Image (spheres, grey):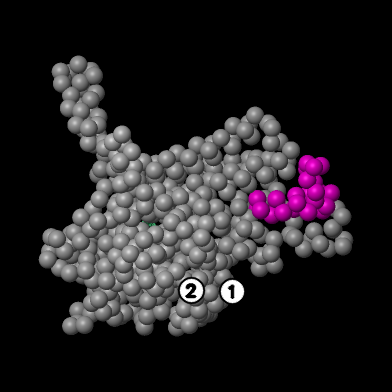
Amino acid sequence: MLRTKEQYHDRLFSMKKNIYIGGEKVGRDDHRLMPGLNVLDVTFDLAKNPDWKGLATAESSISGEQINRWNHLPQNPYDLLQKQKLIRLAARRVGGCIQRCMGHDAINALAICTKEIDDECGTEYHTRFMNYLNGYQLQDLDGTCSQTDIKGDRLKRPSQQENPDSYVHVVEKKSDGIVVRGMKMSITQAAYADVLFVVPTRALTEEDSDWAVSFAVPSDEEGIKMITRPVWLRDKDEKDAAPFSRYGVSDSVIVFDNVFIPWERVFMCGEWQYGRRMALLFADSHRHSYSGCKPGVSDVLCGATALAAEANNVAKMPHVREKLSAYAGAAELAYAAGVAAAVYGEKTSSGVFFPNEIYANVGRRMTGESIYHEYNILTEVAGGISVTLPFSEDFDAPETKRDLEKFIIRNSSIKAEDALKIWKFVESVGASPMTAWYLIAGVHGGGSPVMETIALNIGYDYNEKKRLARYLAGIDSEFDDSEMRSLEPSFGDGLKEERKL
Ligand SMILES: Cc1cc2nc3c(=O)[nH]c(=O)nc-3n(C[C@H](O)[C@H](O)[C@H](O)COP(=O)(O)OP(=O)(O)OC[C@H]3O[C@@H](n4cnc5c(N)ncnc54)[C@H](O)[C@@H]3O)c2cc1C
């Protein structure tokens, strides 16, 4: 089934109240959560739109039914390319983060890792997970990835922490399930998700076995409390602060206070050796998702900069043209890294097709490094008006209206009303609470920058490059080129036929 956004809302609004915002306990219909819900609505609308059938939808590898692509396990490079394109399309519609990729990346990690655990340990997590996922897909549910634990002292492992709840862990095993405690933080869209997918956030040791736990749980389950921070603009400005008056985001601290999870929804319990693998599978899949969303963010910034340049009547200046080209580089190189990650991906033992980690990580690292620069370009071209623009009410007030209508015109071909819309948009994109959210999400989302470095240092063969240098320097007379031979693109079935010709 493909749900309508109304069906999505109905389910959410009937959930138990367990969200706290600013000291109040609120329902999921709280007005401060609406900008986030509006973003999720787009994911349901796209799947219902016949124009985007096959992009926003996919044939389930489990049931064969048409499902929302966010809930689909990629089976081939084409699926990864479609996911990337869908994320960019959706990100452009909402001015940035579409929020639904986290759940998508979590199900990939779970499908792959449960199979690997079962193959090694003789457990039954994979069948359990696939059964659960089948129901999740058929009901068209939306899930988070609740990975980041509050972590306490960053240099101590979970079992060494003074507060054992610094990482989510198992406190009791029963015949019918487990009881878990602990806290996760910075979890995007948790306050308006149907389900929380919980996975470990780091490599674990044997002493950390109780912290090696993964499960799915309804977000209003007994014992779950969410302390939620919506990114919220000044109330009075809502109507003028497009696009972020309509679209926004919320992140939550999630408290698990002795929550019972039946075995049917437990996907790892004690297999500490797989902590790192599960954590990395989510992170690498998420880094590939960035190669769709970050180009979408660059598209919005590029458009805002071009519009600001026009409003300032400096669009033809060479330094502006040069600056705009930086967006083309940032967006399309990130997108190209995602395409390469898809084409050089690999089929895992679970049947899920997984992006190439090297390309996913270099793309993500580049976008994280360039994000402040991209916002800086907008600031340079727009000038300081985005933080000094008078409030909208002053543009309407009789005593100031006429002055401000003159004030706002910088290019005589743009009328005052449109000029105000342009500068409100530039303020919203370049100098609002959402700006700060995008900057910091751009750096830390999917893991801090050092995590990409660590992933590259695990997967990238520096010694092979050294052997090449030794050969070119004349130290060695032969060089083994097998690295280049193993770099074989994986094409989808149709493309494979074309390639043979
Ligand atoms: C806007 C936003 C949305 C997010 N959404 C989600 C989400 O939906 N789901 C989710 O699970 N997470 C989410 N996150 C969390 C994100 O994955 C983390 O912010 C990221 O992994 C970094 O963790 P941290 O914030 O705890 O920073 P820290 O881990 O505290 O990192 C701070 C610094 O300390 C360093 N450091 C930390 N530990 C060590 C160590 N042991 N040794 C050496 N150096 C160390 C880091 O390298 C970094 O430089 C989100 C984050 C943001 C900002």
Label 2, label 1: how far apart the Cα atoms are: 16 Å
For the point 53% across and 74% down, the residue is: 6
- The residue under the point 46% across, 66% down is 189
The answer to which quarter of the image holds residue 363 is top left
Q: Quadrant of the N terminus?
A: bottom left
Task: Tell me the kind of residue under disc 1.
Answer: His
Q: Is residue 406 magenta?
A: yes
Report the number of discs: 2
Question: On the picture, is 211 further left or further right than 139?
Answer: left
Seen in the picture, residue 14 relative to 453 is either above or below; the reply is below
Left or right of 136 in this view: 131: left
Q: Which mark is residue 377?
A: none
Secondary element at image label 2: helix
The residue identified by callout 2 is 8
Q: Which residue is mark 1?
A: 31
The mark lying in front, picked from 2 and 1, is 2
Query: Which circle's residue, 2 or 1, is located before the other in the chain?
Result: 2
Whether residue 457 is visible to the viewer of this picture, yes or no, is: no
Q: Is residue 344 above or below residue 397?
A: above
Q: Quadrant of the C terminus?
A: top left
Q: What percent of the width, then of the height, locates residue 40?
A: 50, 65
Quarter of the image for residue 257 reads bottom left
Quarter of the image where one finds residue 305:
top right
Q: Nearer the viewer, residue 161 or 290?
A: 290
Q: Is mark 2 within 8 Å of ligand 1?
A: no
Chain part drawn in magenta: 404-427
Ligand 1 occupies quarter: bottom left
Q: Is residue 307 above or below residue 253?
A: above
Q: Secondary structure at mark 1?
A: helix
